[in-house]
C-alpha cells in the first residue's frame, strides 16, 4: 500500500541508450541512424507496467524519437499520459548558444505537437543542463511557449547541478514554473533521492525512505525520473568507454524493473501537469 496520500510525479526521459550524454564522446550524432534502436520495446514495457498499476506519468520525449516512431508517441498520449519535451536532439543546453537552444526546443515542441495533435507544455533539459551560466534558457522556454520546466537538479554533481536553487516548484519567469528534481535535505546538504543512476546504485529501502521523508516532512510531491534504457538488460554494450561512464550507465540495470514495480506500489504517482500547477499558484501567492 502507498506510504502517503501525497501524489508524486513519475517522469520518463524518452531517449535511447546511444543518445546518453555520457556517450557523446564515443558515439557521433551522425551514427545514430545506424545504431540498433530499442526505445519501442522499452517504452512498451513501461506502458504495460504503468497500466498494471493504473498509473499515469509524464514522458519527456526527444523530437528525434517522435519523428521516427510517431505511432509510439501517439500511444503514450492515447493511454492517458502527458507528453512533454526533452528537446529535439538531446543536446545539452549548456553546450549551445542561445539561438541554437531556442531552435532546438522550438523544433521539438512543433514536432511533438504535430505528431500527436496534443499541446506540449513541459520541458526537461538533457542532463539537467540549465545552470547559473545559462539562465537565459528560461527566457527561450517562455518564447517557445512552454509553461513549465523540470531542468534543475539542486545537488552537486560533476556534470550538472545547482545546489543553492530552490528544492521545490517555483515561478522562474512570469508564466513559467521550474519544478526541480527532488532532493532530501539532511545535514545542511541536498541528497539525491529521485531516480536515475542513484536509484539503481542505492539500496531500494534507502530510496524509499528518502522519498517518504520528502512526503512526510516537507509535505511536498516528489519528482522521480528514469530512462527507458535503464530497464533494458539486452542493450548493446558500448566499447571503449571509461570505467566511470561504464559503471554509471550499467550499474544494477538488471534490478531496475523490479525496483520500479516496488516503487509504483509504495507511493502514489501521477502526471506533472496534474500535480503541480495548483502548488505553484499557491507558492506564488504566498511569496
Image (cartoon, rainbow, N blue to C red):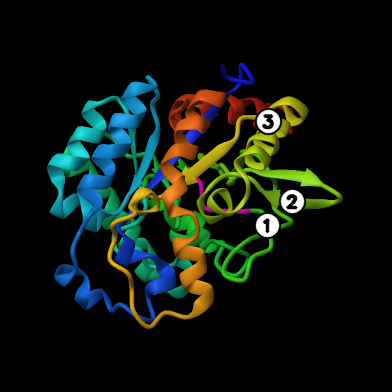
Seen at 62% across and 61% down, the residue is 161
Q: Crowding near pointer 1: few (<14 within 10 Å), some, many (20+)?
A: many
Q: Main secondary structure of the magenta part?
A: loop
Q: Position of residue 170 (x, y in %)?
A: 63, 40
Residue 190: mark in rendering: 2
Contact flag, marks 1 and 2 (Cβ < 8 Å): yes
Label 1 belongs to which residue?
Answer: 155
Tell me the tag on residue 11.
Answer: none
Residue 12: x and y in percent read 40, 43
Q: Earlier in the sequence, mark 1 or mark 2?
A: 1
Q: Nearer the viewer, residue 50 or 24?
A: 50
Residues rendered magenta in the picture: 149-153
Question: Looking at the image, which residue is at 52% across and 32% down?
Answer: 263
Q: Earlier in the sequence, mark 3 or mark 1?
A: 1
Rendered position, 224 above or below 6 = below
Give the side of residue 215 with respect to residue 198, left or right.
right
Q: Which residue is mark 3?
A: 212
* Label 3 SS: helix
Residue contact between numbered discs 3 and 2, judged by CB atoms under 8 Å: no
Residue 89 appears left or right of 273: left
**Residue 134, quarter of picture:** bottom right
Q: Position of residue 48 (x, y in %)?
A: 28, 30
Q: Compare residues 203 and 228 and report the one nearer the observer.
A: 203
How far apart in space, not on screen, are marks 3 and 2 (Cα)?
15 Å
Q: Quadrant of the N terminus?
A: top right
Front one among 217 and 242: 242
Whether residue 234 is visible, yes or no, is yes
> Helix or strand or loop: what does disc 1 sit on?
loop
Amino acid at each position: 500500500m502507498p506510504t502517503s496520500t501525497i501524489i508524486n510525479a513519475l517522469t520518463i526521459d524518452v531517449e535511447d541508450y546511444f543518445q546518453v550524454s555520457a556517450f557523446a564522446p564515443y558515439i557521433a550524432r551522425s551514427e545514430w541512424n545506424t545504431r540498433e534502436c530499442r526505445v519501442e520495446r522499452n517504452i512498451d514495457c513501461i506502458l504495460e507496467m504503468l497500466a498494471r498499476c493504473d498509473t499515469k506519468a509524464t514522458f519527456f520525449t526527444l523530437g528525434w524519437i517522435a519523428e521516427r516512431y510517431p505511432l509510439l508517441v501517439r500511444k503514450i498520449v492515447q493511454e492517458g499520459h502527458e507528453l512533454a519535451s526533452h528537446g529535439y536532439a538531446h543536446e545539452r543546453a549548456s553546450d549551445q548558444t542561445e539561438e541554437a537552444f531556442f531552435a532546438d526546443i522550438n523544433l521539438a515542441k512543433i514536432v511533438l505537437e504535430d505528431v500527436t495533435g496534443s499541446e506540449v507544455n513541459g520541458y526537461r533539459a538533457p542532463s539537467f543542463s540549465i545552470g547559473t551560466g545559462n539562465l537565459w534558457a528560461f527566457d527561450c522556454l517562455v518564447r517557445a511557449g512552454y509553461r513549465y520546466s523540470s531542468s534543475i537538479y539542486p545537488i552537486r554533481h560533476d556534470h550538472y547541478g545547482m545546489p543553492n536553487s530552490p528544492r521545490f516548484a517555483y515561478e522562474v519567469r512570469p508564466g513559467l514554473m521550474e519544478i526541480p528534481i527532488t532532493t532530501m535535505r539532511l545535514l545542511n546538504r541536498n541528497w539525491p533521492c529521485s531516480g536515475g543512476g542513484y536509484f539503481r546504485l542505492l539500496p531500494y529501502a534507502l530510496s524509499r525512505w528518502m522519498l517518504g521523508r520528502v512526503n512526510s516532512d516537507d509535505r511536498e510531491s516528489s519528482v522521480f525520473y528514469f530512462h527507458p534504457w535503464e530497464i533494458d538488460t539486452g542493450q548493446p554494450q558500448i566499447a571503449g568507454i571509461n570505467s566511470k561512464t561504464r559503471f554509471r550507465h550499467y550499474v544494477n540495470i538488471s534490478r531496475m524493473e523490479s525496483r520500479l514495480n516496488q516503487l509504483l506500489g509504495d507511493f502514489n504517482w501521477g502526471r506533472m501537469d496534474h500535480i503541480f500547477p495548483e502548488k505553484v499558484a499557491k507558492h506564488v501567492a504566498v511569496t
